[in-house]
Image (cartoon, rainbow, N blue to C red):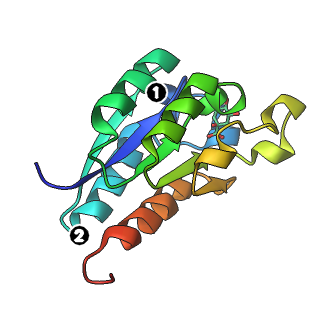
Amino acid sequence: MRPYILLLNGPNLNRLGVRKPKIYGSVQLRDVISNVSQLAETIGVGVVDFQSNSEGALVDFLQEKGPESLGIIINPGALAHYGLSLRDCLEDLSRPTVEVHISNVHQREEFRHKLVLSDVVDGQVVGLGTFGYELAARYLLNLTDPAKN
Ligand code: DQA
């Protein structure tokens, strides 16, 4: 199989483009996936995407596809604030990982300020809209681009 990165989205992100467009914008998840895939394609890297509303399903997927991946882009949705089994899974995998939040969680309700994946990800892109996924992809692809390393 050719090299790939993972693009994971947690609960309610299947509703992207429809749910609270003032906060999350009008771009749909399929457009995000297509944009990241096109970017990765430029250096011959594939994108394996997965969205689930269930933490266990995300952990199962990561355990299966994570070890062989070049890196992980993850928008955990609300699991970012309390998803400890997801956090432990990412720690166990120890792959280059970028956490994305479309909205600026630090400017929102208090419960969104706590991000439990912080210490197990390389970095976080917060509040830059769906452009954040592209930035995360550029970071991971730059790490793995044979022309740059
Ligand atoms: C989100 C922020 C979370 O607090 C929220 O629960 C989401 C989306 C974001 O992308 O801004 O579902 O992860």
- Mark 2 is on which residue type? Thr
Query: At 47% across and 67% down in the image, what residue appears?
Result: 139
Q: Is residue 92 above or below residue 3?
A: above
Amino acid of disc 1: Asn
Residue at position x 54%, y 42% in the image = 26
C-alpha gap between disc 2 and disc 1 = 26 Å
Look at the image and tell me whether residue 54 can be seen.
no
Image quadrant of ligand 1?
top right
Residue beneath the point at 32% across and 42% down: 67
Q: Which of the pair 75/91 is nearer the observer?
A: 91
For label 1, the residue is 14
Which one is earlier in the sequence, the residue at label 2 or at label 1? 1
- Residue situated furthest right in the rendering: 110
Tally the marks.
2
Quarter of the figure with residue 88: top right
Residue bearing the label numbered 2: 42
Q: Residue furthest front?
A: 92
Residue at x-position 32% and y-position 68% = 144
In x, y percent, where is residue 42? 23, 70
Residue 13 placement (x, y as % from top left): 52, 30
- 84 shown above or below 97: above
